[in-house]
């Protein structure tokens, strides 16, 4: 299909989002931008969170992993489900009891202002890197398969997409995003299901027959029993649970939507509904991956990883309607994570770092002016980060996202765990240095353990590479740290906080 026609559908989709934003942002104010006036419908939030949680990475990267890992990613998904239960019954009651707009206000109540700003600081770093990595993936696909043919540079593509996201989040914030995410999740799931049906039909197969073929080809293996492997099932499940606790329960973007629901019971309904649906949706993405590899094997396509799905969907092997739905599904998977991140980062910086809610002498107009300035600044930061990811140009962006999350969400996990699980007191001023020290110690462990990965990425000299590999083998004996990097980082943070704390009543 012509690149011009695909671009037309992308622009038409954006216009639809702008129309929705126009109607939902009427009579909006700072409170509706930050927290939707605490009046969001829990069913809309639950459905929209599917798109926010999955993103363009799931849409492209998860199917791409099936060729090398089979269905092993489902181990992580099981862990996600366990983590959502912890968020629903441990963290949400805490946030509602304290009536928080920013979840990091809990750290101020429990420890002090420095801890509060430390939590917000690590969230801002975490979400900025994670959101822009996801954004880069989709922008790059649009660039390669559509915009390169029209002679439009990558930088221009990234700028225009961010401008469009900015336009429909600019006024309404969370109030608007609850509705746009619902629309986008619908298109994403529609794209997923139609693509599966189209590929199965093209192979003259059925759901059951395709599943049998995948099993014969070795694609359906779920559980990895090699304890030394980074994909060992127990590590994946535990790691997945802690990823959810940290990247959902301790993430202002995800919790911002949950605490915009009017009461705790409905918010918990939202979380349980969402977590159950996620199990089935992730299975469908893995099934799609299996279908893609079966299709590729039968048609002599040797591409794998993140490039496989867009190559098949847009390369002329399937119908034009599939190409259109793939593009719409892809950008629908992207925007719930990008628009929500932009809004949440604006909220966190205004409330947590600048103290907009704490300053009683600021008028609504002054607050709005500050919010708009911050919103624009983060859009510019997103643009710079996307360009930096273009320089890295990884073939599997999900590996980068999980690696970054291990470093940036670990201190949040350790900090909240210390606050919730202990009644010890700690000097507020030492919290930030300890939370910086923990990921640095984790990085050293990771470099030693995953020597081969770092040697390849950093192109280290032969003698340094040999010494590093030898040290890794002598210390870890072949054991590979994988998804549990986040848990290790959180544990180091927790132990450091415990070491510098003393007995004292909870504050």
Image (cartoon, rainbow, N blue to C red):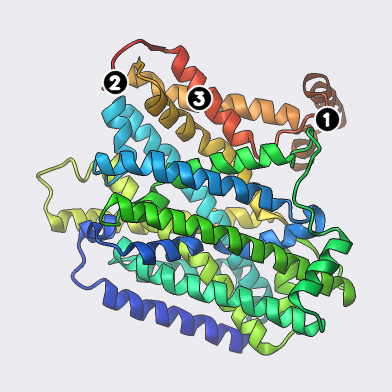
Q: Quadrant of residue 236?
A: top right
Determine the residue positioned at 82% across, 81% down. Answer: 203
Other residues around mark 3 within 10 Å, as few (<14) / some (14–19) / many (≥20) = many
What is the CA distance from the residue labelled 2 to the residue labelled 3? 19 Å
Q: Tell me the SS state at disc 3.
A: helix
The answer to whether residue 466 is left or right of residue 208 is right
Direction from residue 338 to residue 330 in the image, left or right: right
Crowd rating for badge 1 (residues with CA inside 10 Å; few <14, some 14–19, many 20+): some
Q: Which mark is first along the chain, 2 or 1?
A: 1
Percent across and percent down for residue 426 are 35, 16
Q: Earlier in the sequence, mark 2 or mark 3?
A: 3
> Residue 164 in the image: x percent, y percent?
42, 72
**Quarter holding residue 444:** top right
Residue at position x 32%, y 56% in the image: 266
Residue underneath mark 2: 506
Residue 493 has which mark? 3
Q: Are marks 2 and 3 in contact (CB under 8 Å)?
A: no
State the residue at coordinates (33%, 21%): 428
As rendered, which of 120 and 495 lies closer to the eye?
Answer: 495
The C terminus lies in quadrant: top left
Q: Position of residue 346 (x, y in %)?
A: 34, 53
- Pointer 1 residue: 465
Residue at screen point 60% across, 71% down: 153
- Classify mark 1: helix, strand or loop: helix
Q: Is residue 377 visible?
A: no
SS at badge 2 = loop
Task: Check residue 225 in the rendering and tell me which mark sits there, or answer none.
Answer: none
Q: Nearer the viewer, mark 1 or mark 2?
A: 2
Question: What is the distance, in whole Å, between disc 1 and disc 3 at their CAs?
Answer: 29 Å
Residue 58 versus residue 288: which sits nearer the camera? 288
């Amino acid at each position: 299909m012509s690149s011009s026609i695909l671009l037309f559908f992308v622009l038409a989709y954006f216009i639809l989002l702008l129309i929705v934003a126009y109607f939902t942002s009427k009579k909006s104010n700072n409170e509706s931008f930050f927290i939707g006036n605490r009046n969001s419908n829990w069913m809309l939030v639950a459905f929209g969170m599917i798109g926010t949680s999955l993103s363009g990475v799931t849409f492209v990267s998860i199917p791409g992993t099936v060729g090398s890992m089979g269905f092993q990613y489902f181990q992580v998904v099981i862990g996600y489900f366990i983590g959502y239960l912890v968020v629903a019954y441990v963290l949400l009651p805490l946030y509602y009891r304290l009536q928080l707009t920013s979840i990091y206000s809990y750290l101020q109540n429990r420890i002090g202002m420095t801890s509060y700003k430390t939590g917000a600081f690590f969230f801002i770093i975490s979400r900025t890197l994670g959101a822009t990595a996801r954004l880069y993936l989709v922008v790059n696909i649009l660039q390669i398969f559509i915009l390169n043919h029209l002679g439009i540079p990558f930088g221009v593509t990234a700028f225009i997409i961010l401008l469009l996201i900015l336009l429909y989040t600019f006024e309404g914030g969370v109030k608007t995003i609850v509705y746009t995410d619902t629309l986008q999740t619908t298109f994403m799931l529609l794209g997923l299901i139609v693509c599966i049906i189209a590929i199965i039909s093209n192979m003259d197969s059925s759901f059951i027959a395709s599943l049998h073929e995948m099993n014969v080809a070795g694609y359906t293996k779920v559980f990895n029993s090699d304890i030394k492997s980074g994909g060992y099932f127990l590590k994946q499940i535990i790691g997945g649970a802690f990823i959810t606790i940290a990247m959902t329960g301790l993430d202002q973007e995800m919790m911002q939507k949950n605490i915009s629901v009017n009461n705790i019971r409905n918010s918990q309904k939202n979380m349980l509904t969402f977590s159950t649906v996620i199990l089935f949706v992730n299975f469908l993405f893995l099934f799609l991956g299996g279908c893609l590899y079966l299709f590729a094997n039968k048609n002599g396509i040797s591409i794998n990883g993140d490039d496989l799905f867009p190559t098949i969907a847009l390369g002329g092997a399937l119908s034009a309607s599939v190409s259109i739905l793939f593009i719409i599904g892809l950008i629908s998977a992207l925007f719930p994570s990008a628009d929500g991140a932009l809004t949440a980062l604006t909220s966190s910086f205004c409330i947590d770092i600048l103290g907009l809610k704490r300053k009683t002498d600021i008028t609504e107009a002054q607050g709005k002016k500050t919010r708009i300035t911050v919103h624009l600044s983060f859009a510019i930061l997103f643009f710079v980060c996307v360009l930096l990811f273009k320089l890295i140009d990884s073939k599997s962006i999900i590996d980068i996202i999980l690696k970054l999350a291990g470093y940036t969400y670990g201190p949040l996990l350790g900090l909240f765990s210390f606050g919730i699980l202990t009644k010890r007191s700690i000097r507020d001023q030492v919290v930030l240095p300890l939370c910086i020290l923990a990921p640095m110690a984790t990085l050293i462990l990771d470099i030693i353990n995953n020597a081969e990965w770092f040697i390849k990425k950093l192109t280290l000299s032969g003698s340094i590479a040999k010494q590093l590999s030898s040290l890794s083998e002598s210390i870890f004996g072949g054991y590979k740290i994988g998804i549990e990097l986040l848990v290790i980082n959180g544990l180091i943070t927790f132990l450091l906080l415990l070491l510098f704390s003393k007995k004292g009543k909870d504050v």
